[in-house]
């Protein structure tokens, strides 16, 4: 396999007997052109090697809990989801009188100071604790970090990783190396961190991070919404008979040039919901089109 990889230029050795190095600049067109020079059996072996490698990467991600199905989960861990209102659009022209529902939900996340202190008491490692940003051009921000135990040992990287907690988003999905954290933050005592933590927690309930840092936000000034760093978000989920209104969705999505995503959630009332996440910029137009389409269908029948 090493011979084949070197033959198509996907890997190379800087010196005889040295370690094999993958060529990160290889593009797909060059790869497909070069692979034609290999015997058919070698091509089959090579593609089987790629398939086996992909399968192992996926299996490892599943074991580590990092596998992403492309579905956005809400109401997990520290998130709290409340259903605010539901608009129902009935598809009378379809058998069974199917209906499409547009739900407005409120998603609250974040970590209050009392819970941050609970984390601090449970994680008393040498480097665990509160850190404040060192960027002099921005208002100070604060995070809490704690060391995490790796699920598997990496021979090439034995550095200690840290989980990051923020006032407005609680646990950050990405873990960081301590050396990278210290490039932007310095460790402080809980007393010094408390005021900043509570200030960020309160402001993030209604304002985006740009307003906290700079005092203004381009998106907000332009009349649109900004969700960056907000602790409270309002989302719209389309569920029920979604395929019945597919033509309306395609029109709205194309006009607004937005991408829609599948989402599943569990509310505080233990209600499960699966549907399409509708971008806020598309909601008003979608409601108008659904109401108009519903009225036209009724008149035509």
Image (tube, grey):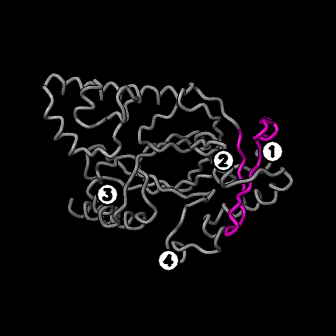
Q: Residues within 10 Å of mark 2 (few under 14, many from 20)?
A: many
Considering the numbered disc 3 on the image, is that residue within a helix, a strand or a loop?
helix
Of callouts 4 and 2, the N-terminal one: 2
Of circles 3 and 1, the one toward us is: 1
Residue that label 1 marks:
117
Is residue 165 rendered to the left or right of residue 107?
right
Considering the numbered disc 1 on the image, is that residue within a helix, a strand or a loop?
helix
Is residue 231 rendered to the left or right of residue 257?
right
CA–CA distance between discs 2 and 3? 33 Å
In the rendered image, residue 165, in percent from the top left (x then y), is placed at: 68, 46
Residue that label 3 marks:
249
Q: Residues within 10 Å of mark 4 (few under 14, many from 20)?
A: few
Residue at figure coordinates x 81%, y 52% from the top left: 188
Q: Is residue 121 magenta?
A: yes
Pick out the residue farthest to the right: 191
Of callouts 1 and 2, the N-terminal one: 1
Quarter holding the C terminus is bottom left
Considering the numbered disc 4 on the image, is that residue within a helix, a strand or a loop?
loop
């Amino acid at each position: 396999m090493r011979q084949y990889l070197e033959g198509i230029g996907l890997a190379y050795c800087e010196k005889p007997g040295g370690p094999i190095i993958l060529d990160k600049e290889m593009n797909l067109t060059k790869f497909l052109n070069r692979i034609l020079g290999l015997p058919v059996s070698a091509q089959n072996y090579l593609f089987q090697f790629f398939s086996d490698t992909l399968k192992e990467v996926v299996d490892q991600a599943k074991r580590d809990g990092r596998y992403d199905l492309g579905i956005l989960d809400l109401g997990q861990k520290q998130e709290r989801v409340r259903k605010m209102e539901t608009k129902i659009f009935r598809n009378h022209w379809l058998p069974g009188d199917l209906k499409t529902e547009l739900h407005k939900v409120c998603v609250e996340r974040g970590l209050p100071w009392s819970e941050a202190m609970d984390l601090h008491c449970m994680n008393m490692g040498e480097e665990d604790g509160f850190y404040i940003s060192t960027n002099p051009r921005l208002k100070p921000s604060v995070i809490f970090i704690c060391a995490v135990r790796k699920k598997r040992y990496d021979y090439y990287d034995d550095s200690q990783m840290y989980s990051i907690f923020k006032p407005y988003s609680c646990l950050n999905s990405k873990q960081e190396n301590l050396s990278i954290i210290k490039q932007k933050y310095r460790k402080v005592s809980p007393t010094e961190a408390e005021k900043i933590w509570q200030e960020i927690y309160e402001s993030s309930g209604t304002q985006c991070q740009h307003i906290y840092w700079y005092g203004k936000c381009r998106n907000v000034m332009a009349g649109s919404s900004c969700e960056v760093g907000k602790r409270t978000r309002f989302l719209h989920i389309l569920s029920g008979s979604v395929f019945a209104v597919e033509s309306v969705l395609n029109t709205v999505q194309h006009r607004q040039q937005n991408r829609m995503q599948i989402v599943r959630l569990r509310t505080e009332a233990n209600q499960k919901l699966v549907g399409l996440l509708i971008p806020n910029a598309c909601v008003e137009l979608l409601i108008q089109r659904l109401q108009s389409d519903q009225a036209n269908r009724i008149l035509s029948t």
